[in-house]
């Protein structure tokens, strides 16, 4: 019996909590994710923007730094507005800071393009390779660290392609090129040359690569050495364009390291360009998401504010009508009372007329006296 009572109390408390939760949710202002996508599809024909925004709404709210400052939480109804911004004035200020219509111009395709300028440029980002210095300067420390971590497997494939298919290096030259790769991936190698030569080779590697952090799966490049590697790659390409010789050689390990730096430079340049383009697209997508959500919040807040004003106005009218009806009823009661009093005052007692009537009816004065 006690267990049944506890179970009953538990169900009742859960029912109260669910009802309170529903009440709180009914008073909150939320923005469904489907509404965001529908609004964007009405505003632009860029399929890349719509696809990117759909993927962004599937990400956790903690990753959407800009949106997180305006949204309290995320639940089954969508994004819930922060209580500090629930007033029309606060939302108007936020929308003025992040206007939607101005930003939607960036998402409109130009002329015959089916994509917006940002996503159209992503296909031609490698035509802007000469701007890598400016791009590198604008990237964050986390992005630079990600760029400088080169996959060992990808580097091995590119190195082998560089030594065989592209330049047809001989076996000895290939060994000098692959020596640096094997040294970075912690492969056991027999010592070659004097101790001074080995120390010089090691110091040359350490100038560009973090040997201690490099593993069999990842090769770490010093972020400070990335510009030097890319300059070396550009110089090598310029020498190739000016040189008439078809062959390439790496007779020493230093020459092999130079070839390795060319391959690494090509990989790093590609990563810098793609990372910069990705960061631009991320910024545009986050800005677009925030502006769409704020616009929806503002519309919902204005509708709710208008409904509250209309409700309060109706209550005032009903209250005034109730007061008027009470005053009217009171006046009618007073009028009836005055009329009744007037009628009572109008009726007077006439004794002579009453005696005359009695005598006509056969009554005499004696009988009346008796």
Image: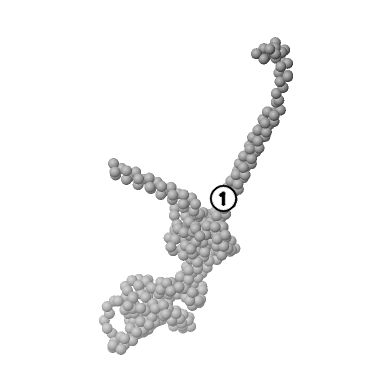
Position of 112 relative to 351 (above/below): below
253 with respect to 144 (left or right): left
Residue 310 placement (x, y as % from top left)? 59, 48
Position of 282 relative to 321 (above/below): below
Q: What is the quadrant of residue 257 in the picture? A: bottom left
Position of 37 relative to 216 (above/below): above
The structure residue drawn at horizontal position 55% and vertical position 60%, both measured from the top left corner, is: 91
367 with respect to 147 (left or right): right
Residue 207 placement (x, y as % from top left)? 37, 82
Q: In which quarter of the image is the N terminus?
A: top left
The structure residue drawn at horizontal position 32% and vertical position 45%, both measured from the top left corner, is: 6
Q: How many marks?
A: 1
* Secondary element at tag 1: helix
Q: In which quarter of the image is the C terminus?
A: top right
The structure residue drawn at horizontal position 67% and vertical position 33%, both measured from the top left corner, is: 338
Q: As rendered, which of 360 and 159 lies closer to the eye?
A: 360
The structure residue drawn at horizontal position 56% and vertical position 65%, both measured from the top left corner, is: 97
Q: Mark 1 points at which residue?
A: 308
Farthest-out residue, top: 362
Q: As rendered, which of 317 and 178 lies closer to the eye?
A: 317
Position of 238 relative to 361 (above/below): below
Q: As rendered, which of 44 and 61 lies closer to the eye?
A: 61
Residue 54 placement (x, y as % from top left)? 47, 58
Residue 147 seen: no
Q: What is the quadrant of residue 105 in the picture? A: bottom right
């Amino acid at each position: 019996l006690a267990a049944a009572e506890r179970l009953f109390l538990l169900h009742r408390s859960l029912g109260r909590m669910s009802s309170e939760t529903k009440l709180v949710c009914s008073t909150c202002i939320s923005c469904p994710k489907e509404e965001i996508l529908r609004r964007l599809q009405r505003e632009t024909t860029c399929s890349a923007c719509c696809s990117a925004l759909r993927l962004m709404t599937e990400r956790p709210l903690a990753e959407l730094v800009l949106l997180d400052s305006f949204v309290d939480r995320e639940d089954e109804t969508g994004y819930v507005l922060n209580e500090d911004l629930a007033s029309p004035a606060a939302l108007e200020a936020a929308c003025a800071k992040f206007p939607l219509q101005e930003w939607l111009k960036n998402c409109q395709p130009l002329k015959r393009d089916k994509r917006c300028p940002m996503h159209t440029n992503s296909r031609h980002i490698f035509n802007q390779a000469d701007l890598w210095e400016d791009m590198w300067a604008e990237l964050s420390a986390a992005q630079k660290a990600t760029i400088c971590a080169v996959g060992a497997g990808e580097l091995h494939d590119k190195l082998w392609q560089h030594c065989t298919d592209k330049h047809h290096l001989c076996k000895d030259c290939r060994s000098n090129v692959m020596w640096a790769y094997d040294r970075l991936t912690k492969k056991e190698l027999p010592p070659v040359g004097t101790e001074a030569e080995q120390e010089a080779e090691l110091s040359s590697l350490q100038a560009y690569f973090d040997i201690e952090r490099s593993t069999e799966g990842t090769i770490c490049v010093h972020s400070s050495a990335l510009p030097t590697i890319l300059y070396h790659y550009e110089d090598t390409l310029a020498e190739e364009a000016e040189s008439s010789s078809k062959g390439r050689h790496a007779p020493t390990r230093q020459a092999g390291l130079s070839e390795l730096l060319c391959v690494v430079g090509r990989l790093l340049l590609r990563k810098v360009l793609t990372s910069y383009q990705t960061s631009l697209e991320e910024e545009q997508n986050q800005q677009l998401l925030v502006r769409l959500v704020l616009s929806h919040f503002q519309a919902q807040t204005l509708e709710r504010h208008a409904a509250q004003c209309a409700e309060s106005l109706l209550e005032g009218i009903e209250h005034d009508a109730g007061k008027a009806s009470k005053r009217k009823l009171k006046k009618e009661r007073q009028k009836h009372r005055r009329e009744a009093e007037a009628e009572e005052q109008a009726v007077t007692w006439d004794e002579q007329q009453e005696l005359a009537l009695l005598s006509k009816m056969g009554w005499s004065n004696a009988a009346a006296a008796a």
